[in-house]
Image: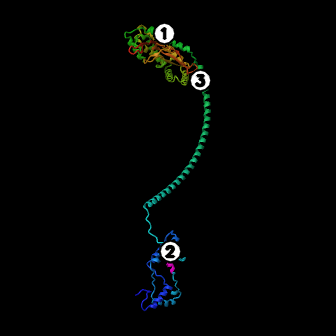
Amino acid sequence: MPPRGIDTPGKGRGFSESSQVDVENPATETPTASSLPRAQDQEEYQDSDGEDQSVTDGADGTYQESITSNKPRIILQPSRCLRSKAAKQAPTQQGLPTPSQIETPNSRKRSGEKHDDATARPEKRGKKPAVDPKIKKYEKAFDEWLEDYKSKTQSLETLKTKNQELHRENDSLKKDLKQLQQDQKRKEASQQSHIAQLQSECSKLRRKLEAAIDAAKQDSGKYTKVSDSDIAAGWGKLCYNIRDIVSQCLTNRPANECDEIETLMKRMKKFLPLSQCNVASLRVAVLRRSIWYTIKSAVFSAMRPIWYGEAGQTLTQILLIEGQRCFNKPHCLKMLSQMKFRAIAGLNDGPQLDERAKGATLMLVEAAKIMLSPFIPDSMMDQFEAKMNKLIMDAVDLQTMMMSSKAIYFLRWLGDDDGAQFTPYNREMMESMQSDVDAYTSRYFVEFVEAPALIKYGNADGEGFEFHMILWKSSVILRELEVIPNSDDGSMHMAV
């Protein structure tokens, strides 16, 4: 069958009519293969977001122009018989336009001319570009950071809220603390005032008590001001009696005299002298020191309960120990003086009346006789015991005199170095027992101390304990130092 619109034999009239119809009333265009993609593109354009309408309109015009100019336009029209049949049937249908009434599209639009009523068609979208993996990675990291930031921001807000609550609580506590401190200060001020009042009353009562004690002691006759001359006289009496005992009773010279003298020195915890002199030359000095050592230990150091029994022994030992410990502390010595003064008032009358004291005295005399027996002739034993007993009683009287005073007395072996080194002779503290020695020169050192010194701290009124004085110097034996040149190097050294 020949295509429509092409002239065939016997059909000349039909061809002319068909051509005329095509020119004047072209038929409605039937959808072709090329028109289907354009319809799909139109739907995609309507579904897309954010496309620019003006851009798509221009693209559509270009697109239509290219299609019109490149592809031949083929119009499919119904055959003549179908048209005639349709023309016959058309009037029967009410409201339908006839073929002549169908609007023929303007051919100029097909040729690329634009019209205001032309529908804008979107440009065909190409393939979506592939997303870079790094961008996805950064986007994912950014999302994670954003979530972390939101979480930390929320935590920060929570902490800020807690911090504000703590600040408010802290301010409240500070306010309460300040109030409590003010209350405490008021209480302390009130208590301090009360304490000061009590201290004032206590001081008044203490002064009254001390005055009453002093008055009672003055009335009892226990307290007497003892002069330094009386103390020195009693001490001098002891020194004389000891020298008398040695010269009158200790006249025996045993065969092993040097050994006996060394034994006495060891018993007194005294080392041998540094000089190389004969020990026998110190015989008299060692015997005198032995008697002094016995009297000092038993009476003045209270090694035996001779002075006022056990009560006097305890008081004497306390004063001796504490006094030696703080002799350079005036306030401590003053306290010891006050304690001694109050303790003396409680002792019974007569230090020699204590039975324990009597027994201790007899034991001391016996011990001295045994210690010095190698030097006592048999004919002098009774006389030695009598003289020794009298010496102990004189020492007890001197101890009573010193303890009744408010001053404090100490006995010291000044110049005694226990053989460790040479002690220079000091005329202010020592007295030489040798008449043929020029003690004014500096060539002498102390070789042996035979009698201790008596030192007084404070005064009879219980004051001035920062000062002390030597009531009686220590008795010493001196030796002269000789300077001998060294023949080897020409240096000098000391020799006795």
In the depicted view, which residue is nearer to us: 204 or 96? Answer: 96
Marked residue nearer the N-terminal end (3 or 1): 3
Mark 1 highlights which residue?
438
* Tag in front: 3 or 1: 1
Query: Can residue 239 be seen at all in this image of the molecule?
Result: yes
Q: Give the range drawn in magenta.
A: 107-113
Side of 399 where 188 appears, left or right: right
Instruction: Kindly identify the amino acid type of the residue bearing the numbered disc 3.
Output: Ile
Marked residue nearer the N-terminal end (3 or 2): 2
Mark 2 highlights which residue?
61
Taking the spot 51% from the left edge, 79% from the top edge, the residue there is 108
- The residues bearing labels 3 and 1 have C-alpha atoms spaced at a distance of 53 Å
Q: In which quarter of the image is residue 267?
A: top left
In the depicted view, which residue is nearer to us: 387 or 76? Answer: 76
Mark 3 highlights which residue?
213
Query: Can residue 350 be seen at all in this image of the molecule?
Result: no
Q: Residues within 10 Å of mark 3 (few under 14, many from 20)?
A: some
Report helix, strand or loop for mark 2.
helix
- The residues bearing labels 2 and 1 have C-alpha atoms spaced at a distance of 152 Å
Q: Vertical placement of 85 versus 443: above or below?
A: below
Residue 77 colored in magenta in the image:
no
